[in-house]
Amino acid sequence: AGPDFWDGTPVNYSTDATQSFMGSRAVLVDGNSTVSQRINIGPSRFYTISFYGKRSTSAAVTAGARIEVFKISGNQFAATDVGSYFTTCTKGGGLDSNELDLHFDAPLDSSNTPQYARGSCVFSSPADAVAVRIKMYGGAGNAAAWIDGVQVEENEFMTDYADGYGGPGAN
């Protein structure tokens, strides 16, 4: 199992306090690994997902999140169904055409040192949506990215990260 209620397939998986950006740890995932968490949501609402990502080396590496939306029946919506409502996420951008996708290449500073950057996207939940599964990934193959500060919020915009489980801004 992954950190703080996250499930994973940790082929190459690490938490390292020296790599954290927000909180006390970050997770390193590569193209062979994901960590995921299922979160209950409400129907017909806007949600924003955001996270911080950093490549593990100076080589170009993508940090990403795949978003699966589930119906009351337990079946997964197709990304095109969710995207027909509203989304700024990529439709079918993951390995599975039923997933929404958020990904970006984290920047390097002037010394070619990897830096954290924050990405976000918004989607509206269909009328019979009850849950999402967020699957964090990094790169392809052995290319890895650090992921930190994952946040899902019920609103149409990203807010400051809220560390913890119930503090201001935490859902």
Image (tube, grey):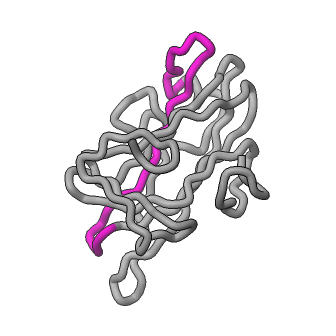
Q: Residue furthest top?
A: 73
Q: Residue furthest left?
A: 142
For image coordinates 36% across by 44% down, the residue present is: 34
User: Percent position (x, y) of residue 21?
Assistant: 52, 70
| Residue 57 highlighted magenta (yes or no) | yes
- Above or below 106: residue 63: above
Q: Residue furthest bottom?
A: 111
Confirm whether residue 143 shows in the render: yes
Confirm whether residue 107 shows in the render: no
User: Percent position (x, y) of residue 44?
Assistant: 74, 27
Q: Is residue 60 left or right of residue 149?
A: left
Residue in the foreground of this view, choosing between 145 and 165: 165
Report the number of numbered marks. Answer: 0
User: Percent position (x, y) of residue 157?
Assistant: 72, 52
User: Percent position (x, y) of residue 25?
Assistant: 47, 64
User: Where, quadrant-wise, is the N terminus in this rendering?
Assistant: top left
Residue in the foreground of this view, choosing between 93 and 153: 153
The quarter of the picture where residue 70 lies is top right
For image coordinates 47% across by 69% down, the residue present is: 20
Point out the stretch of residues depicted in magenta. Answer: 56-80
- Above or below 11: residue 28: below
Q: Is residue 143 left or right of residue 77?
A: left
- Above or below 131: residue 163: below
| Residue 89 highlighted magenta (yes or no) | no
For image coordinates 55% across by 28% down, the residue present is: 69
- Above or below 148: residue 37: above
For image coordinates 68% across by 41% down, the residue present is: 47
